[in-house]
Amino acid sequence: MSHWVPICLVSDIPVLGSRRVAREQGAPVALFRAADDHVFALLDRCPHKGGPLSQGIVFGHSVACPLHNWTIGLADGCARAPDEGCTTPFAVRVERGDKGDQVLLDAQELKTLAVELLATESRAAA
Ligand code: FES
């Protein structure tokens, strides 16, 4: 059974922007907010050379990596053709609350998914 952890409000994420969520182990998770207020979560590492997707440009339900401009789908974490590869997507739940819509992530996924992948070092990302 999933245990959902409250992370922030949808309104805490800039429209067409992102917010990083640190984890005890592994690279952070990047939360993205599309123009239609859909919220997505991906490991904050591009499948190409590990660029920080949280610093990319969000358009539609995609993000352009800041390093070499690959387009990554926010729903599946996969690069759009002709590029290939996927980063890890995380399940997101949004619940209505008194103070606004709350974004929640799955505790088990935060603890276990892609924990072997560390945040990108700038040397490796160049
Ligand atoms: S590291 Fe993202 S496109 Fe190269």
Image: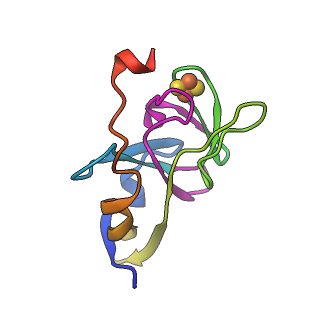
**Span of residues in magenta:** 33-58
Which quarter of the figure has residue 109?
Answer: bottom left
Q: Is residue 8 visible?
A: no
Quadrant for the N terminus, please: bottom left
Is residue 34 inside the magenta stretch? yes
Q: Position of residue 111 (x, y in %)?
A: 30, 61
The residue depicted at 62 percent of the width and 55 percent of the height is 75
Farthest residue toward the bottom?
1
Question: Quick check: can you spot residue 19?
Answer: yes
Is residue 120 inside the magenta stretch? no
Between 67 and 48, the one lying in front of the other is: 48
The answer to whether 104 appears left or right of 39 in the picture is left
Q: Residue furthest front?
A: 116
Q: Is residue 44 above or below residue 107?
A: above
What residue sits 65% from the left and 48% below the top?
61
Q: Quadrant of residue 16?
A: top right
Work out whether residue 23 or residue 19 is closer to the camera in this orientation and state it.
Answer: 23
Residue found at the very far right of the displayed protein: 82
Residue under the point 77% across and 35% down:
81
* Figure colour scheme: rainbow
